[in-house]
Amino acid sequence: MHIGYAAMLERFAPSEAVELAALAESHGFRGVMAADHFQPWLPRHGQSAFVWSVLPAIAEHTTGDIGPGVTTPTYRWHPAMVAQASATMAAMYPGRHWLGIGSGEALNEHIVGRYWPEAPERINRMFEAVDVIKKLFTASAAGRDVRHSGPNFKLESTRLWTMPDTPPEILVAAGGPVTAKRAGRTVDGLITMDAPPERLELLLARFAEGAREVGRDARRMPKVLQFHLSWAPTDEEALANAMREWPIAGMRIGKGDIRSPFEFEQLARGVRPEDLADRLTISSDPDVHRAAIQRAFDLGFDRVYLHNVGRNQAEWLEVFGREVLPKVTR
C-alpha cells in the first residue's frame, strides 16, 4: 500500500522535517508530501520553511515519491516559476516528483498585498495556471518555445531549459465536486483532505466523470488523500494533542479567507472536544486508525499521506510502522 508521510513544514523546523521524513521511510512509509506555506496555521506551530528548498533535502535522504501537496501558482507565484521549480525537481529525482496545485488560502497568498477574490475566481485562476504549466512542460519537452495570453496570466515566448525526460504528474487539490470534475478533465490526478465517506465518494465520482468526458480512465489516475489524525499512548493524550496542536480541524467556518495565524488562534479558542469528533481520527488504538485508513483505500484512493498532529512524531512513526501500515490491504 502507498502510505506516505505528510511533512508539516509549518510545524517543524526544516532540518527536523528532513530527519522525520527519513525516519518515516525507515518505518515503511513510502513517500513524502509537504505544503507550500508562507505562514503557519497557528502561532504556536512556529515554523514555515520554504518548500522548494526543503523538498530536495528530503529527497536526498529518502527514496520514495515526493511532491508539494500543494503549491499555489496564482498569487505569490507566477505559474512559470512553479513550472521551473517542478521541472528542476523532476530532473534531479527522475520518477519521484509530482506537482500538487491548489487554489490557495489568504493565510499564505495575501502577503503580497493583492486583492483576494472569492473562491470561484481563485479556482478559475488555478486552472489557467495549470494550463500555463502544462504548455511549458509540453513545449519544453519538445524543445519548443511557448507563449500564453489569458485573463490572468501572460507568458512571453519562452521554454524551460532544464526538463526531465518525462514531465511530472500534475495533481489538483479539490474540496468540492465542481472542481473535482474539472480536475478529471484537465490534469493527471486528484488531491483532497480526509472527510466523511459520502463526501469523498462524491469527489471521486465527479473526478471520474470528468475524466470520462475526455476519454480517460480515472482508475489509472492518481488519487491522493491527506489524512490528519491524533495518536498517543492514551486516549486522553491523543485528545489533548488534538486540542492543543490542531484545533483548526474543529472550526466550522471556511479557512480560505483567514489572513493571519493570530486570527486562526482567536477563532480556534471556541473549539470544543466534541467539535473534533467527526473531523479527526483521535485514538490511542492503532487499529482504530488502521480502519480509518483502510476506508480511504476501499473508497478508491491510491495514496494516503498521514499527519499525526501531536509532537510525538518518532514514537508515532514507530508504532504505525509496526502495527498499522502492514495491516492495510488493497
Image (cartoon, rainbow, N blue to C red):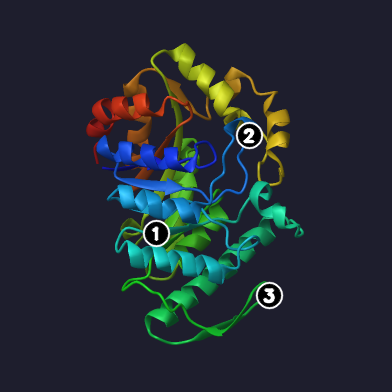
Q: State the residue position of label 1.
A: 98
Residue 19 drawn above or below residue 98? above
- Of pointers 1 and 3, the one earlier in the residue sequence: 1
- Residue 129 in view of the camera: yes
Q: What residue type is labelled 3?
A: Pro
Q: State the residue position of label 2.
A: 42
Circle 1: element type:
strand
Q: Position of residue 184 (x, y in %)?
A: 45, 62
Of circles 1 and 3, which is in front?
Answer: 1
Q: Which residue is drawn at 48% across and 86% down?
A: 145
Q: Where is residue 212 in the image (x, y as percent from the top left)?
A: 40, 65
Find residue 153 and report its image quarter.
bottom right
Q: Residue at x 60, y 40 (%)?
A: 40
Q: State the residue position of label 3.
A: 151
The CA distance from mark 3 to mark 2 is 34 Å
Of circles 3 and 2, which is in front?
Answer: 2
Looking at this view, is 24 or 289 the one in front? 24
Q: Which amino acid does label 2 sit on?
A: Leu
- Of pointers 3 and 2, the one earlier in the residue sequence: 2
The CA distance from mark 1 to mark 3 is 27 Å
- Of pointers 2 and 1, the one earlier in the residue sequence: 2
